[in-house]
Structure formats: C-alpha cells, structure tokens
Image (cartoon, grey):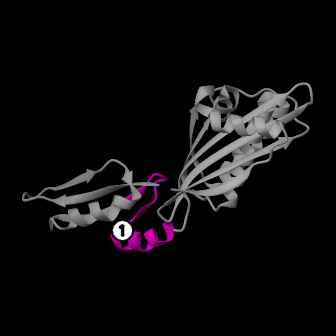
Amino acid sequence: MKMKIKFKYKSKTASDIWFESGFFKRKETLIHVDDLMKTGRVVDLEIIDEMGNSWTRKEYIKLNQELEKEPENIVVFFDGGFDKETNYAGAGIVIYYEKGGESFRIRKNALLEEIENNNEAEYAALHIALGLLEEIGVKNVPCTIKGDSQVAMKQLGGEWPCYEEGLSRWLDRIEGSIQRLGLKPNLIVLNRKDNKEADKLANQALQGIKVHSNKRLE
C-alpha cells in the first residue's frame, strides 16, 4: 500500500496554502509527516491511501500497527493452458506480497477438468489466484494482476465485450471475488516471455506435477 499527504501550510501572509504529495511507500509515511510537523507551520494534515481512505496522524499511528499484520504490495501472475488431446487444463499462479516487513511468494498449480478451451483455462487460473488472496487475508487493497491472456485481461478491464456464455460465467465469478475482497485491480497484459513462472506451473500441472508453496523470500 502506498500513501500520500495532504496538508495546509500556514504562510507568513494571511493566506493558507494547501499542498498534496505524490504517493510513496507506506513505511515512509511517519518520517515525512514528522519532518513536516517540525516546521511548525503545518495544520489540518491528513494521510491518504490508494483506496481514497484518509486519517489524521494520530489515527494513522494506530492504523499502521494493524497494517503491519496485513498482506500488501500484492502482485499476481497467472496463466492457463489447455491440452486438446486430453481435454485437461493446467492453471499456474504466482503471487508476490509483503507482510510485517517481509516478502513472500506463493506458487500454485492445478489440473482442471471440464474446461473447454484455453481462454476458459486462463479465467480459471485467475479465479484460483483470487481464492488464494482470500486465504491469506487480502482485503481492501490495490492489487496488480499480470497475465498474457489478451482475452481475459481485456474483457475483465471492460475493453472487450464477452459474448461466450462459458467465459461470461467465469467473468461474473471473478468480478464477484474482486468486489467481495474490495480489491482495486491494476491489470497489466504481459508478453508470454514475461510470464514464464506461471506458464511453467501450468505446464507442470498438465504433466501431473503438483506445486503449492508459500515461501518467505530472503
């Protein structure tokens, strides 16, 4: 999660001047706030997160202790693959996040039945990824979602219409999960070469190799 500061600066004239910063890392928030307060000319300061929530300095100090316990700075990679010969699909998901000042990575794949094509496999992979976010307690935060499926990403972002009934059902499920978790998704379409980790997991699922780990990164 990133924060910004909005404050009123009491100038030497009769005018009060409002300033608003750009977003910066949450851990820097109190450093910036305390530096501003030392000037003795700052009043009506508020701290604002990427979701539009705002707090006073006192409120934020209490909130910050709670935020240390929550997952943040979440990046999701997903990929789906479909084997026409076996009619099985493979889903691969990689999630990076931070919690309590430490970095973590989840890697998971799944072998799926009753999937009709590659586009549906992509949607299924993203749906699984959102389920993993719910498992680790992600709630009401920005989330970057990266995938190489133009169809899934463009339809989810509202740029392309979705006419296929099967894909429309997946889209409804995914949009419902995003709304339930209170996510603010940033959708990024990747080249396939930039999605190798999730692609490998999807292929391993089709080969019968099961992967599921949640590892703290050094």
**Magenta residues, as a range?**
47-68
Give the percent coordinates (x, y) of residue 157: 62, 34
**What's the residue at 74%, 45% (across, down)?**
127
The answer to whether any part of residue 157 appears in the image is: no
Give the percent coordinates (x, y) of residue 19: 25, 52
Residue occupying the far left of the picture: 12
Does 131 sit left or right of 22 as displayed? Answer: right
Look at the numbered disc 1 and give the secondary structure of its residue.
Answer: loop
**What's the residue at 56%, 60% (across, down)?**
71
Task: Judge whether 64 appears above or below 80 on screen.
Answer: below
**What's the residue at 34%, 59% (across, down)?**
28
- Where, by quadrant of the figure, is residue 61 drawn? bottom left
Which residue occupies the foreground of this view, 120 or 97? 97
Does 48 sit left or right of 94 as displayed? Answer: left
Which residue occupies the foreground of this view, 134 or 52? 134
Give the percent coordinates (x, y) of residue 135: 70, 60
Is residue 49 one of those drawn in magenta?
Answer: yes
Does 165 sit left or right of 109 as displayed? Answer: right
Q: Residues within 10 Å of mark 1 (few under 14, many from 20)?
A: few
- Where, by quadrant of the figure, is residue 112 drawn? top right
Which residue occupies the foreground of this view, 137 or 113? 113
Is residue 5 one of those drawn in magenta?
Answer: no
Task: Judge whether 30 appears above or below 190 on screen.
Answer: below
Tell me how many marks there are.
1
Does 12 sit left or right of 208 as displayed? Answer: left
**What's the residue at 50%, 71% (across, down)?**
66
Give amino acid for label 1. Thr
Residue under label 1? 56
Give the percent coordinates (x, y) of residue 167: 80, 33
